[in-house]
Image: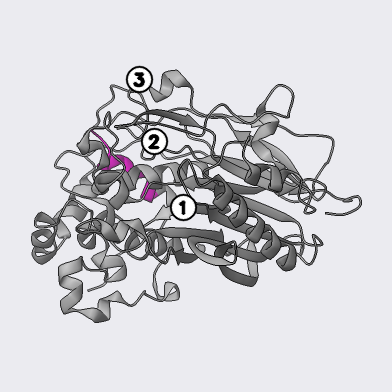
């Protein structure tokens, strides 16, 4: 039976929430948080949509394990994706649906659905864009890029040991809505994600209906696979809006270190702007974690730079590189990128008073080993070909709170980074 996109949207994101509220729809770009104490009556349309979900789907959701495989109930109407036990009996549902056959959904309505599911949680924190415009005018709209390690669900619940984070804050049924809310609030043209372990049952089907084209490259030996009831391997994902860009070339890169293939990956795509006809390369990566692996990360970074050198034809094509580098600015891999012949600059340095210092942190968490506060995430860009128009400021220590990240307020242990880029009209010299 045909269901309207609105009804499908509700079926996707309504999850065991008997009382729902509707919050104001977003503005053109940035959303102010709703009043902290505001509780509104449930939306009749949302409740009607919830009651329309089939009994079989409801039964499936009640028996879902905590790893989040129960999202099959939410997405059965959208992508025919089942949980692990059901999928083993119905392998045909493991085939990713053709996005051309999925009706588009309104991002404002999806945001309403997310906020309805999150009605018992504190509101989103307010983050503002810092205007970094120079005297370089552009006749085309800027390109908004979001970089974010969203925290793999299996790792968050099974391996990362966030000792100050309540278990309830990590439940996928709500945490995925916090992730989607963050994406929908800032409406990126390009989205670069790490630690994605719900690509096929969550992000690909939903974001494709919002107009994005996505690519996913999993880690060969993902640590998520060691966790009971996992949802498959985690990896990097790259999404771009199809109404703004045309895909020219795409490369999945398995990074090497000292000639050995490693467990870390990258995606690099050459896109063409439909408004201007100009091309650029966008890349996403996630380098090896942990202290003691600095030389390994350095080698991985050199391998990625060499690949990008080839893809950009010796820096002739402008480049943006997003990633969780797992490296502070003092590490060799950071220095390799800062001194590369690709002429890259780190966008978030521009938020500092001197324009030369990275933020004090992009991740802040408490594990059994102690408190970890580091700058590990970056957006690099070709400084002669591109300009940063604005950048999203980071959460303050007061906003993050004493228990750090993740939390009921924020779904990941890493902060999202968002920048608006424009092409320089007359790039000088090498890009």
Does residue 283 sit above or below 289 in this rendering?
A: below
Q: Secondary structure at mark 1?
A: strand
- The residue that disc 1 covers is 194
- The residue that disc 3 covers is 402
The residue lying at 62 percent from left, 65 percent from top is 269
Range drawn in magenta:
109-120
The residue lying at 55 percent from left, 52 percent from top is 296
The secondary structure that dominates the magenta segment is helix
Left or right: residue 354 compared with residue 126: right
| Marks 2/3: CA–CA distance | 29 Å
| Marks 1/3: CA–CA distance | 25 Å
| Marks 2/1: CA–CA distance | 30 Å
Does residue 360 sit above or below 300 in this rendering?
A: above
Q: Earlier in the sequence, mark 2 or mark 1?
A: 2
Work out whether residue 424 can be spotted. Answer: yes
Does residue 400 sit above or below 324 in this rendering?
A: above
């Amino acid at each position: 039976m045909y269901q309207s996109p609105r009804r499908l949207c509700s079926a996707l994101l309504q999850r065991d929430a008997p009382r729902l509220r509707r919050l104001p729809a977003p503005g053109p770009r940035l959303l102010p948080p709703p009043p902290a104490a505001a509780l509104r009556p449930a939306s009749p349309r949302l409740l009607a949509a919830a009651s329309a979900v089939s009994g079989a789907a409801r039964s499936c959701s009640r028996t879902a394990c905590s790893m989040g495989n129960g999202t099959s109930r939410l997405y059965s109407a959208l992508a025919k994706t089942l949980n692990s036990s059901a999928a083993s009996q119905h392998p045909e549902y493991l085939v990713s649906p053709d996005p051309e056959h999925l009706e588009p959904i309104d991002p404002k309505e999806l945001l309403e659905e997310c906020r309805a599911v999150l009605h018992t949680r504190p509101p989103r924190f307010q983050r503002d864009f810092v205007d970094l415009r120079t005297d370089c005018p552009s006749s085309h709209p800027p390109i908004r890029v979001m970089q974010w390690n969203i925290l793999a669900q299996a790792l968050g619940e099974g391996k990362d040991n966030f000792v100050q984070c309540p278990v309830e804050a990590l439940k996928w049924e709500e945490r995925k809505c916090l992730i989607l809310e963050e994406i929908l609030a800032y409406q990126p043209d390009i989205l670069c994600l790490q630690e994605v372990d719900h690509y096929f049952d969550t992000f690909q089907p939903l974001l494709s209906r919002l107009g994005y084209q996505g690519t996913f490259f999993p880690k060969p030996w993902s640590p998520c696979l060691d966790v009971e009831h996992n949802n498959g391997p985690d990896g990097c994902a790259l999404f771009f809006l199809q109404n703004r860009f045309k895909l020219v070339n795409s490369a999945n890169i398995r990074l090497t270190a000292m000639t050995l293939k490693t467990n870390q990956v990258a995606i690099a795509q050459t896109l063409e702007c439909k408004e201007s006809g100009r091309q650029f390369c966008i890349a996403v990566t996630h380098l090896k974690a942990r202290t003691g692996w600095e030389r390994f990360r350095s080698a991985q970074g050199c391998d990625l730079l060499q690949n990008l050198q080839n893809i950009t034809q010796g820096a002739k094509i402008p480049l943006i590189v997003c990633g969780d580098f797992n490296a502070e600015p003092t590490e060799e891999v950071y220095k390799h990128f800062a001194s590369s012949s690709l002429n890259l600059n780190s966008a978030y340095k521009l938020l500092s008073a001197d324009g030369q210092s990275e933020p004090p942190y992009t991740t802040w968490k408490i594990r059994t080993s102690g408190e970890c506060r580091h700058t590990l995430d970056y957006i690099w860009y070709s400084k002669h070909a591109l300009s940063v128009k604005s950048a999203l400021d980071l959460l303050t220590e007061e906003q993050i709170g004493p228990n750090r990240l993740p939390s009921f307020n924020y779904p990941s242990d890493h902060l999202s980074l968002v920048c608006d880029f424009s092409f320089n009209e007359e790039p000088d010299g090498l890009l």
